[in-house]
Image (cartoon, rainbow, N blue to C red):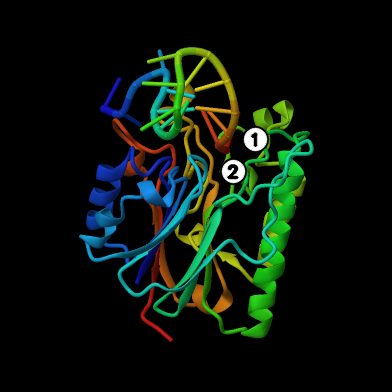
DNA sequence: ATGACGCATAGCATGCGA
């Protein structure tokens, strides 16, 4: 069984590429982020005509997450419990479409799009950290209730956990960029302390291994990227991991997303 | 070559991304 995660940066703009990759890659479960559409505009038939069930959560042109599966799609949940909402300057907080969960062949999959902190001193940064802390609280509770639970927290985490996960850590530090700050990295490590493992890391060792390259400034051809998309696996799921890769071919050419898909292969099991 | 940002909107400028 293969599980993949991919921030597509608009599903409608990339429908042909996503369909082609879905067929070529042979993944059983595909978690998507940044569909950038509401349910009314979602290309349901793209998945259905290829044998995938699909669940989507999208409320505007921003964010949007989905899970497609050809091995079952049950108990769909939109937003995790107590998911923080972003409210600004007295405006009522809005619940954003950043998390959808479903059970696929015994694996509880969460497709997540972690908020962008924007800047270290921006009010989106505490929102990002609170969002992560709340998800981790629940994830650790799910494992406490069932230590054998097969849980995959997959998506665009908007954090580069290690120095080698960005092309120039000195520049990031000097400029005070987000994604590499200590509070963000600490929020990521908290998931590891809860028992979750970056399932792809061992099969895709760095340095210089990335999942995202900015459209600007020739970042892709210059191999200047960031590793920010992850499959975090619970212990029982991690025990089934037999391979992983980042499909950087999909970043090439006209009409590519700025993120590449991350694929994790699981042994039959349990 | 992979090549100098791209996507959304009831749009023609602006917000967002990381």
Which label was assigned to residue A214? none
User: Which residue corresponds to mark 2?
Assistant: A164
Instruction: Point out the image quarter for the C terminus of chain A.
Output: bottom left
Q: Is residue A42 above or below residue A202?
A: above
Tell me whether the residue at label 1 lies in contact with that at label 2, contact meaning CB atoms closer than 8 angstroms. yes
User: Which residue corresponds to mark 1?
Assistant: A169
SS for callout 2: helix
**Residue A180, image x and y in percent?**
68, 41
Is residue A249 left or right of A157 when viewed as pictured? left
Question: Which of the pair A108/A45 is nearer the observer?
Answer: A45
Q: Chain of mark 1?
A: A
Is residue A190 left or right of A240 when viewed as pictured? right
**Residue A210, image x and y in percent?**
48, 43
Q: Is residue A28 above or below residue A125?
A: below
Task: Residue at 76%, 45% (x, y): give it.
Answer: A126
Question: Tag 2 or tag 1, which sits nearer the N-term?
Answer: 2
Question: Which of the pair A135/A239 is nearer the observer?
Answer: A135
Tell me if mark 1 has few (under 14), some (14-19) or many (20+) residues whose alpha carbon lies within 10 angstroms of its own: some
| Badge 1 and badge 2 in a common chain | yes
Q: Is residue A113 above or below residue B9?
A: below
**Residue A6, image x and y in percent?**
42, 51
Task: Residue at 28%, 58% (x, y): give it.
Answer: A47
Is residue A14 left or right of A93 when viewed as pictured? left
Question: Which of the pair A162/A21 is nearer the observer?
Answer: A21
Tell me if mark 2 has few (under 14), some (14-19) or many (20+) residues whose alpha carbon lies within 10 angstroms of its own: some
Q: CA distance from mark 1 to mark 2?
A: 7 Å
Question: Which of the pair A92/A174 is nearer the observer?
Answer: A92
> Is residue A222 at all visible to an observer of this figure?
yes
**Residue A183, image x and y in percent?**
76, 48
Instruction: Point out the image quarter for the N terminus of chain A.
Output: bottom left
Task: Residue at 49%, 32% (x, y): give it.
Answer: A224
SS for callout 1: helix
């Amino acid at each position: 069984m293969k599980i993949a995660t991919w921030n597509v940066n608009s599903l409608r703009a990339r429908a042909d590429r996503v369909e082609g990759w879905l067929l070529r890659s042979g993944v059983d479960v595909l978690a998507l982020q940044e569909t950038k559409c509401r349910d009314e505009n979602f290309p349901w038939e793209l998945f259905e005509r290829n044998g995938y069930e699909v669940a989507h959560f999208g409320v505007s042109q921003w964010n949007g997450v989905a899970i497609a599966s050809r091995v079952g799609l049950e108990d769909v949940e939109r937003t995790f419990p107590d998911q923080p909402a972003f409210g600004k300057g007295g405006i009522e907080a809005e619940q954003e479409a950043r998390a959808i969960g479903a059970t696929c062949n015994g694996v509880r999959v969460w497709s997540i799009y972690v908020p962008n902190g924007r800047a270290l001193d921006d009010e989106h940064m505490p929102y990002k950290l609170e969002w992560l802390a709340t998800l981790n609280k629940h994830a650790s509770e799910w494992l406490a209730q069932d230590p054998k639970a097969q849980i995959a927290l997959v998506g665009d985490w908007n954090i580069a956990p290690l120095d080698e996960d960005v092309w120039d850590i000195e520049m990031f530090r000097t400029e005070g960029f987000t994604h590499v700050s200590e509070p963000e990295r600490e929020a990521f490590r908290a998931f590891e302390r809860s028992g979750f493992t970056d399932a792809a890391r061992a099969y895709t060792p760095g340095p210089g291994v990335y999942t995202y390259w900015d459209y600007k400034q020739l970042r892709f051809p210059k191999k200047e990227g960031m590793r920010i998309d992850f499959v975090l696996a619970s212990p029982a799921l991690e025990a089934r991991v037999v391979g992983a890769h980042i499909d950087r071919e999909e970043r090439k050419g006209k009409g590519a997303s700025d993120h590449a898909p991350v694929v994790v292969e699981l042994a039959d099991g349990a």
